[in-house]
Image (tube, rainbow, N blue to C red):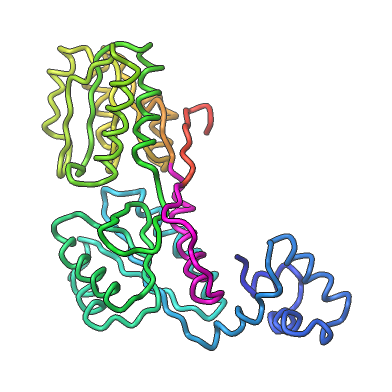
Amino acid sequence: MISLEKIAELSGVSRRTVARALKDKSKVKDSTLAKIEAVLKEYDYEPNLAARYLAAKNQNFKILYMVYRSESSQFHARIFELAKAKAAELRGFGITIDFLVLDHGQADPLGDIKRITADFNYDFLIALPIYEEFFQPYVHALFCKVQELHIPMIFYNMDDTSYKRDCYIGCDYEKSGRIAAGLIALITQNKGKIAILSHRSSRIISFMERVHGFKGELFQKYHDIEIVYTHTMENDYIDVDFDFLREQKVKAIYLVNPGDYSVCPRIREELKGLDVKIITNDLLPISQKYMQDGIISAVITQNEEIQAKKPLDLAFKILVNKEKIDFDKYYTQLGILISQCI
């Protein structure tokens, strides 16, 4: 969805001229109209919806976008960055997007969510279900308030069907786990001992579903691959039993939810005599570097751009175009990257 400002920029005319063309073509010169319509066609802009777009500026729609931020979650930092860029586009249509940032680094990380829940005055909520004990009760109260007010709500990145959300946009984590199992099978030539490591994941749906898919795929197809060690940490990887991993001569490690990826170079150093292969998730600057350095063998991607931006596109269509969502889940495309792809 392209904003009026962007249409004007690409057409070489003013924003007012674009608005006039969308409202009444007869009031714009043919040559100018041709430029504008060429841009509209290229960006799949529907002129018949122009009146609604312009009307949105008079309705003062407000969207609350909840994001999570921590030093150990670079993936969510990327989603926040992409969402802010998309929000800037929608503001061109007169829509207000406020971000509720759940961040332990804030002076009062619960203050904003409590204030917003007490006096909720938004037309739409885009949210990430949080299972961290510190935030979870307050997030739950917010979701219950939104349900009580019958406000549309979309979940992204992680789903929770115990709430009445309109849809989920994000990864099929079980399928992601099955893909990881296939990669491990290729790397180990279908046999050998492997391990599962993860960061702050024992209660997180993405971890549970990935591991379920991973183990299920191994059980069904790769009977000679044995998981000899599983370790999840709440804070870091300081107590990983590398002595045991050396004794077992593990061939590969599935790093499920890596956190800040700091364990990757440590695996290489601790197990350097074994040439252990690491399969993990999400292409970020640090995981890209470790792939190029030969520390990570492959990364399974889940398209953070769609997760960040599509909820805002849908919110716009629901609020402005009065459209209805005709699906319950929208799974992002999963990809496999190795160093040669970068």
* Furthest-front residue in this view: 326
Q: Is residue 59 left or right of residue 109?
A: right
Residue drawn at 69 percent across, 61 percent down: 43
On screen, residue 333 above or below 106: above
Left or right: where does residue 197 sit relative to residue 189?
left
Residue 87 picture location, percent across and down = 48, 68
Q: Quadrant of residue 295?
A: top left
> Relative to 229, does residue 239 appear above or below in the rendering?
below
Foreground pick, 297 / 1: 1
Task: Give me the residue at 35% from left, 12% from top.
Answer: 190
- Quarter of the picture holding the N terminus: bottom right
**Which residues are drawn in magenta?**
302-331
Q: Is residue 314 magenta?
A: yes
Q: Tell me the residue at 44%/57% (across/down).
A: 308
| Residue ID at (17%, 13%) | 248
Q: x%, y% of residue 250?
A: 24, 16
Image position of 35 (left or right of 308): right
Q: Is residue 200 above or below residue 293?
A: below
